[in-house]
Image (cartoon, grey):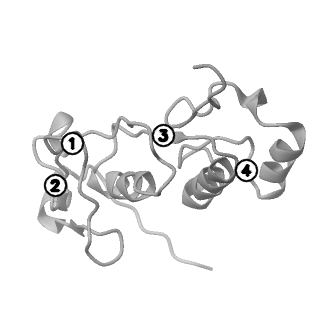
Amino acid sequence: AGNAPPAVHQGGDGIADRDFFPAPVRQDFLNLGNPLPRGERAEGGKLIGSILIHDYCMSKGIPVWHGGMLESGIGRAGNVALASLPNFTLPGDISASSRYYTEDIVEPAFYVNSDGTMDVPQGAGIGVEVDRKRLDNVTIRMAAWKAG
C-alpha cells in the first residue's frame, strides 16, 4: 500500500511480473545462468538462483515469500530451509507432509505449528533422514546408469 515496495513471490508462479526487474538486473540473472529472474527452486537456477533473488531483493528492501506444495519431504526440506532466510518475511504456502501424503518418505515429517510456522530441520545435510523402507514401498521403477 502507498509507497511500499512490491513483494516478490518465489513459488510456483514465479515472479508474476518479470518486467518488475530492470533490464540490467534481468541480464545479471541471464549471466548467472538463470533464464529469467524467478524464485522457484525448479525455475530460478535451483537453490543458488533462489538465494540470489532473495539477496538481491533484500538489498533493495523488497520483501519476498516462497512457496512449495507438492514436494515430498526431500524437496520440502529445501523449501523450508530457503524460506527460513531473513528476507522471507511474508507468509508462504509450504504445507505439512500430511496435506498430500499419508506417510512422507522422510523423518521427521513436516508439521505446521499452531502459529503457522514450520520448524527448520536441524539434522545433517538436508536436515531430515530418508526412510528407505517407505521409499522402497512407493518406488515404481528404478534405473541405473554407468559413466563411460
Mark 2 element type = loop
Name the residue tied to disc 2.
Answer: 109
Name the residue tied to disc 4.
Answer: 34
- Indicate which label's residue lies in the foreground, 1 or 3: 3
Marks 2 and 3 in Cβ contact (< 8 Å): no
- Specify whether 104 is left or right of 78: left
Mark 4 element type = loop
* Closer to us: 121 or 107: 121
Looking at marks 3 and 4 on the same chain, the residue that comes earlier in the sequence is marked by 4
- Specify whether 100 is left or right of 37: left
- Indicate which label's residue lies in the foreground, 2 or 3: 3
Mark 1 element type = loop
- Indicate which label's residue lies in the foreground, 4 or 1: 1
**CA gap, disc 3 to disc 4?**
19 Å
Name the residue tied to disc 3.
Answer: 65
Residue type marked 2: Ala
Looking at marks 4 and 2 on the same chain, the residue that comes earlier in the sequence is marked by 4
Name the residue tied to disc 1.
Answer: 96
Marks 4 and 2 in Cβ contact (< 8 Å): no
- Specify whether 106 is left or right of 25: left
Q: Residue at x 77, y 50 (%)?
A: 29
Mark 3 element type = strand
Q: Quadrant of residue 13?
A: top right
Counting from the top left corner in percent of width and height, residue 25 is at 82, 46
Residue type marked 3: Trp
Marks 2 and 1 in Cβ contact (< 8 Å): yes
The quadrant the N terminus occupies is top right
Counting from the top left corner in percent of width and height, residue 10 is at 53, 40
Residue type marked 4: Asn
